[in-house]
Image: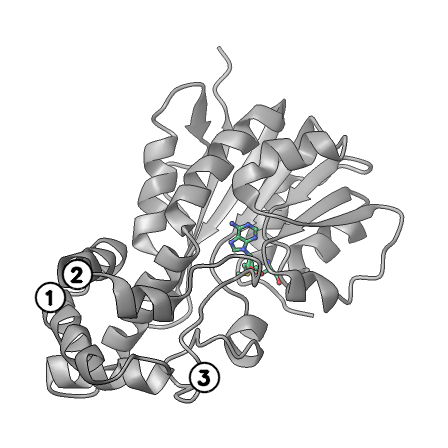
Amino acid sequence: MHTPVLLTQVMEALEIKKDGLYIDATFGEGGYTEAILNKGGKVLGIDLDEEQLKSSRVNELTNLKLVQGNFGDIEKIAKENNFFPVDGVVFDLGLSMRQISQSGRGFSFKKVFEPLDMRMSLNSEMTAGYLLNHLSESELFDVFAKNSEEINSQKIAREVIIKRQFKELETVGDLTSCIDKAIGEQDNNAYKRIFQALRIQVNEEFENLKNGLIGATKIIKDDGKIAVVTFHSLEDRIVKNFTKTGGIKLLNKKPIMNRRGRTFEKVAKLRLIVKDIL
Ligand SMILES: C[S@@+](CC[C@H](N)C(=O)[O-])C[C@H]1O[C@@H](n2cnc3c(N)ncnc32)[C@H](O)[C@@H]1O
């Protein structure tokens, strides 16, 4: 079972009530779900990736319901399952370790022979390979620059266009070699940023997050809480901006952080959103 990085902080923040209703919007390997169940809460777990739900080892049957779906549809999913209003919602964004190491979908720049797939759900059609082989240079630049703020985005987009004139990009190694050529050296941080940018695009992660937050505020009780854990500064910005839209507020002005390493994407930030009731 995976232990999420900010588990203790999220559990403290949600103040789980016995028989309270909680949505784990990013079920993954079930770390938050298990902790909520252990405190007597009832959980609706959602994950886009059907494989995550199939491999679940959480064996509670009465207080847990698992649904394959997109948290962008959280309001609809909660209502279809008659699971609302809820006491809390947790979003733990990104990928789980199992997806990175075992899915075979090209999420990691280290898995050079894997295909450039990067779909969280195999039901969706868009893949990273499709984007790399079909977008124009300026569209690729936009994907890299907007989703990752990688400073070499222009050069990398150019290299992709040059490479694909000879042969379509198929594997992780095909993409890392374009990045090497564009930058002139091997740079793990650039790989990480570009891979993350593509994954965000393939899975429409920013749009889903916005829709998920809107939906979650519609189904929480007046004293309910939404906990959002991000690992990406642009996602954190979406969460912060969302709390300025009215009717809701941040419980903590500064995010609760856990810095696992020095590289940019290892900083986990927890933000807590509550209803702003006068
Ligand atoms: C960081 S992992 C969550 C780990 C989880 N907290 C645990 O304890 O194992 C993120 C999970 O969210 C899922 N996910 C990402 N985007 C999603 C979306 N839009 N809707 C539903 N699930 C999503 C991923 O498939 C992945 O399983």
The type of residue carrying mark 1 is Gln
Residue extending farthest to the right is 62
Residue visible at 22% across and 53% down in the picture? 146
> Cβ–Cβ below 8 Å for labels 2 and 1?
yes
Residue visible at 62% across and 28% down in the picture? 220
Q: Residues within 10 Å of mark 2 (few under 14, many from 20)?
A: many
Mark 2: C-beta under 8 Å from nearest atom of ligand 1: no
Q: Position of residue 247 (x, y in %)?
A: 45, 18
Residue visible at 23% across and 74% down in the picture? 190
Q: What SS does tag 2 mark?
A: helix
Q: What separation in Å lies between label 3 and label 2 (alpha carbons)?
A: 23 Å
> Cβ–Cβ below 8 Å for labels 1 and 3?
no
The type of residue carrying mark 3 is Glu
Please name whichever residue, 20 or 152, is drawn nearer the observer in this view of the structure.
Answer: 152
Quarter of the figure with residue 186: bottom left
Q: What separation in Å lies between label 1 and label 3 (alpha carbons)?
A: 25 Å
Q: What separation in Å lies between label 2 and label 1 (alpha carbons)?
A: 5 Å
Q: Which mark is residue 141?
A: 2
Q: Which residue is mark 3?
A: 114
Please name whichever residue, 84 or 174, is drawn nearer the observer in this view of the structure.
Answer: 174
Q: Judge whether 222 appears above or below 4 on screen.
A: above
Q: Could you tell which of marks 3 and 2 lies nearer the N-terminus?
A: 3
The type of residue carrying mark 2 is Phe
Quarter of the figure with residue 216: top right
Q: Which residue is mark 1?
A: 154
Quarter of the figure with residue 99: bottom right
Q: Judge whether 118 appears above or below 217 on screen.
A: below
